[in-house]
Amino acid sequence: MPSHIQPFDQRLEGKTEWDSPMFRLAQEQFLRAARIMDLDENIRDRLLFPQRSLTVSFPCRRDEYSEVETVFGYRVQHVLTMGPTKGGIRYHEDVNLGEVSALAMWMTWKCALMQLPFGGAKGGVRIDPKQLSRPELQRLTRRFTMEIISMIGPDRDIPAPDMGTDAQTMAWIMDTYSQQVGYAVPEIVTGKPVVLGGSHGREEATGRGLVYLVCEAASHLGMDLGKSTAVVQGFGNVGHNTVRFLTEHGVKIVAVSDVSTGLYNPMGLEFTSLRDHVAEHGVLKGYGGAEEVSNTELLEIPCDILAPCALQNQITSRNAANIKCRLLAEGANGPTSLEADQILQDQGVFVLPDILGNAGGVTVSYFEWVQDTQNFSWSLEEINDRLHKIMGAAFRRTLLRSQRDQLDMRTAALIEGIGRVAEAKLLRGLFP
Ligand code: GLU
């Protein structure tokens, strides 16, 4: 190695702009897979950092006209080799460049694993969306869109919802972008309302995809879903749809949680009454007929299926040994630490890793983008049928590799994704 190039390992020691605990987890997962698959060193180094990252600070006027807050926002594109980049925009008070970069890297592996023609991206704004009124959120979204407008585009980088954002956020982004170019550009974002060119089935796609995989895993493990129990952490878009579809398959939901509380009832919780309670009160707290449990207690409840569908870094070396599930279905991004992975593996837990588990969302986003670019609309049945096939095929590819090479499911999924990106990089060659 030429002397002016810093040794590879040193670059990991908190010295880069992207450094954060989450980015380190993404890098360490990647490096572990790269070692096992004997990835070309030059390609490994290229994939270890995002290709483009933009940090912005901008003003957000509060409803009280004289109050202007400065907020920070990010958009990161990890790999531009595979086609346009794709990934959500997150509104959360802890968002930072490292977190967004980790999420962008995971989007790359996720898209490649699902064989979608995208590289990974992610964006975020460091605010607590619950503290903002609707007009404030609209102003913030429009201004953030303007700040990143040179980076995004329907053939360039296509945002979508993530934690703290939804179809309405996407509608404002689509409108702001369209105003700039002078005509409607629905294909600039996915996850928008159906009337604006959104896709049927996109809203619930992540939860639906996760439950398709749970069915595949259950038949592989010889589990009878009708006799199984589940604990779901999170009752946002992913969590609540996961509860809904698991219930449809006869799974008994023994515990759920959201930011306000955890609820436990060994006799089972009913999806429709949980949903109605949240529709009326905004949160799960106050729901009768269940014991309140903490987040720590929730994760350790004995069950067949544990589905973390909320934040990252939930299952770590601290609690992994106490996890008592047979199947871990990751709806969230990055819920499990590297050390916890090893412990779970030793305990014989079968893992549906995040880049596979929550890939239903970006898969239907891909369908949405294809429909928009062709000015064509598919029915819900067609969407679900295509989603089912793609999720099933990705599950079988991952399982096959894990069995053939004696790997855990996360490493197998990562190697599937990384291998595809590495092959494309080698074929495209270097410029100049
Ligand atoms: N934010 C979602 C994810 O993490 C969806 C991204 C998309 O649809 O582009 O996969």
Image (tube, rainbow, N blue to C red):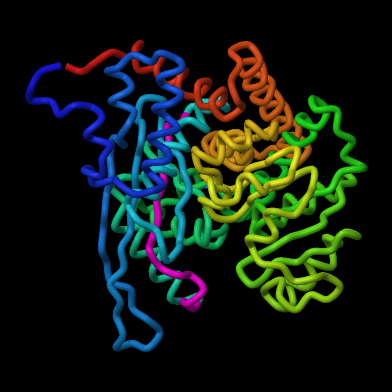
Which quadrant of the structure image shows residue 413?
A: top right
91 on left or right of 251 = left
In the image, is residue 274 above or below residue 99?
below
Count how many numbered circles sit on residues in the image.
Answer: 0
247 on left or right of 343 = right
Task: Indicate the position of residue 404 as horizontal and vertical percent values.
Answer: 63, 11
In the image, is residue 277 above or below residue 45?
below
Please identify the quadrant where the N terminus is shown.
top left
Find the magenta span and give its range.
118-133
Task: Indicate the position of residue 395 as horizontal and vertical percent values.
Answer: 67, 25
Query: Residue 407 colored magenta?
Result: no
Residue in front for this viewpoint, 153 or 299: 299
Residue 200 visible in the shown view: no
Residue in front for this viewpoint, 348 or 372: 348
Which quadrant of the structure image shows residue 431?
A: top left
52 on left or right of 1 = right
Residue 55 visible in the shown view: yes
Who's the residue at 28% across and 13% down the image?
429
Which quadrant of the structure image shows residue 320?
A: top right
Who's the residue at 46% across and 37% down the image?
106
Residue in front for this viewpoint, 176 or 88: 88
Query: Residue 124 colored magenta?
Result: yes
Who's the residue at 35% across and 61% down the image?
144
Who's the residue at 72% across and 43% down the image?
208
